[in-house]
Image (spheres, rainbow, N blue to C red):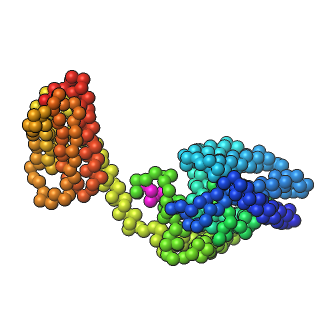
């Protein structure tokens, strides 16, 4: 018990000192986060506070194997896995620090997380089996690698995305560290107990400067390091105990960041945006939109996390099937909380899924039509054949009309016009555009005027116009090469 207490207090005191030093360092090197459209702070704030968390936690963890007791002996006996975890967490920290100082593409950070997670799997830190009920083990086999990587990368990014308000990520991670430490010590896993107490102490000291109004932010170096270490620690707990509680408790403690990340990914998917695109619709943003101040929103999330983990602790004293019931009930409560604050709407999600499916079907049909017309255009050799192909394209792409106007040097204008069989009276739903043709004969200036039915989507009309333009571009190249005759 003395060792555990020394680890916690030592990392706490070291974090207090290190955070003060980091604040001064960040000011000197210009590593500050300035207010912007995605931020809620109003003044430049140092953003590399994760250095203090890393130093405080790692210093105490590295010192424990030197202690001459059972805890030190346990560290020395598992030096391969412990060393792999420390090394991979350090590399993730360095990737985050480089991003804070220089800026890295999101894909680079994601690749680093994948590689470090795979590295842990290769040294035996992976989920190979899960105890679902008493006496029943689910053997994952090779799927254990995939589950482990998804868990580590998912939790790492969930913590990273939750770092949006003063003290939010640090406080939630501190609660997660506490609950994992309780589970680890309850199940006799002294190594993970030390890891979590060291992190908890460093976060406790850091929160003194990070809670609203924050004097320092942890930055990506802190959030990536915390998320990765928490995820890996929970995997190691599961590896030792082979019970679902080892993953369930951290999942409940990080339930809000995890669900927030999942809903964020779903939202970006439905909006047809990049998964790495910035977002201002996170759970904590919704709390601010409800009128809560920063510190009140953070306290609400703290209370929700404490409630979820408090209920989850009943899993330690219940049977396996009861643990699953408790886990499921708490997850439902977290989902209801997201619904209450407006972070997710089932009806709106279903509607967007239908819209995305309809969009995908429409895009697929337009692509098939284009590919057929592309072959058709490549078979023409005379102007008459080419014009027939243009009319066929206008029909297939649902144009209202197409006009080819050729202006001669003497001012004379020749015009070829195709019109749809039925033109709607509401011309406001028609998109019109002019397309110049560059390869006319000397003294001639041909150009297309096209009108396209919007069909309820201006984007669809623009896409069909783009595909029609590709057909014309290919024809222009054939005219220039002498393969197609056009007046």
Q: Quadrant of the C terminus?
A: top left
Count of numbered badges drawn on the protein:
0
Query: Where, by quadrant of the figure, is residue 237 drawn?
Result: bottom right
Which SS does the magenta portion mostly show? Answer: helix
Residue 170 vs 368, above or below: the answer is below
Find residue 300 and report its horizontal and vertical position in percent: 59, 75
The reply to whether residue 57 is in sight is no
Query: Could you tell me residue 381's position as x and y percent?
Result: 16, 26
The quadrant where residue 244 appears: bottom right
Quadrant location of the N terminus? bottom right
Along the viewing direction, whichever of 133 and 472 lies nearer the viewer = 472
Compared with 103, 389 (above or below) is above
The residue lying furthest to the top in this view is 482
Q: Is residue 56 above or below residue 396?
A: below
The x, y position of residue 114, in whole percent, is 60, 46
Q: Residue at x 58, y 55 (%)?
A: 157
**Which percent across, then down, holds residue 147?**
58, 51
Write the residue at 8% across / 37% down.
412
Q: Does residue 131 appear left or right of residue 435 in this picture?
A: right
- Along the horizontal axis of the image, is 415 left or right of 378? left
474 lies above or below 6: above
Q: Looking at the picture, tell me which residue is in the foreground, 286 or 243.
A: 286
Residue farthest to the right? 68
Q: What residue is drawn where x is 33% and y is 59%?
A: 354
Q: Is residue 430 within the magenta segment?
A: no
User: Camera-side residue: 156 or 143?
Assistant: 156
**What residue is rendered at 22% in x and 41% in y?**
435
Range of magenta residues: 265-269
């Amino acid at each position: 018990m003395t060792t555990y207490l020394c680890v916690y207090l030592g990392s706490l005191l070291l974090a207090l000192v290190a955070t003060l030093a980091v604040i001064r360092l960040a000011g000197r090197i210009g590593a500050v986060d300035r207010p912007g459209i995605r931020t809620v702070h109003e003044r430049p704030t140092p953003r590399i506070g994760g250095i203090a968390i890393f130093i405080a936690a790692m210093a105490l963890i590295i010192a424990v194997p030197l202690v001459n007791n059972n805890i030190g002996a346990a560290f020395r006996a598992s030096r391969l896995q412990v060393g792999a975890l420390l090394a991979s967490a350090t590399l993730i920290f360095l990737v985050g620090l480089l991003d804070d100082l220089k800026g890295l593409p999101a894909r680079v950070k994601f690749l680093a997380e994948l590689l470090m997670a795979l590295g842990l799997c290769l040294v035996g830190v992976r989920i190979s089996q899960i105890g679902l009920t008493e006496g029943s083990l689910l053997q994952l086999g090779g799927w254990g690698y995939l589950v482990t990587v998804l868990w580590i990368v998912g939790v790492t990014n969930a913590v990273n995305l939750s770092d949006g308000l003063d003290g939010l990520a640090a406080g939630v991670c501190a609660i997660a560290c506490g609950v994992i430490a309780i589970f680890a010590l309850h199940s006799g896993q002294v190594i993970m107990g030390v890891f979590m107490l060291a992190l908890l102490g460093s976060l406790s000291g850091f929160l003194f400067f990070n809670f609203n109004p924050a004097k320092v932010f942890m930055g990506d170096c802190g959030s990536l390091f915390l998320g990765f270490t928490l995820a890996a620690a929970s995997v190691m707990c599961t590896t030792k105990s082979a019970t679902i509680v080892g993953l369930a408790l951290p999942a409940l403690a990080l339930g809000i960041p995890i669900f927030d990340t999942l809903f964020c990914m779903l939202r970006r998917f439905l909006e047809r945006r990049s998964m790495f695109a910035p977002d201002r619709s996170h759970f904590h943003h919704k709390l601010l939109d409800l009128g809560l101040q920063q510190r009140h929103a953070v306290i609400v999330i703290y209370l929700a996390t404490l409630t979820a983990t408090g209920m989850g602790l009943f899993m330690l004293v219940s049977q396996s099937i009861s643990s699953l019931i408790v886990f499921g009930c708490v997850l439902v409560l977290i989902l209801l909380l997201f619904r209450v604050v407006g972070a997710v709407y089932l009806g709106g999600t279903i509607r967007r899924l239908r819209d995305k499916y309809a969009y995908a079907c429409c895009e697929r049909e337009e692509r098939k039509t284009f590919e057929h017309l592309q072959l058709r255009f490549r078979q023409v050799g005379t102007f008459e054949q080419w014009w027939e192909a243009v009319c066929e394209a206008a029909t297939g792409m649902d144009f209202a009309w197409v006009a080819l106007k050729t202006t001669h040097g003497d001012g004379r204008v020749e015009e070829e016009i195709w019109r749809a069989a039925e033109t709607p009276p509401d011309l406001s739903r028609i998109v019109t555009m002019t397309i110049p043709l560059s390869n006319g004969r000397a003294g001639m200036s041909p150009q297309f005027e096209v009108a396209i039915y919007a069909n309820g989507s201006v984007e669809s009309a623009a896409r069909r116009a783009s595909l029609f333009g590709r057909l014309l571009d290919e024809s222009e190249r054939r005219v220039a090469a002498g393969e197609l005759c056009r007046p």
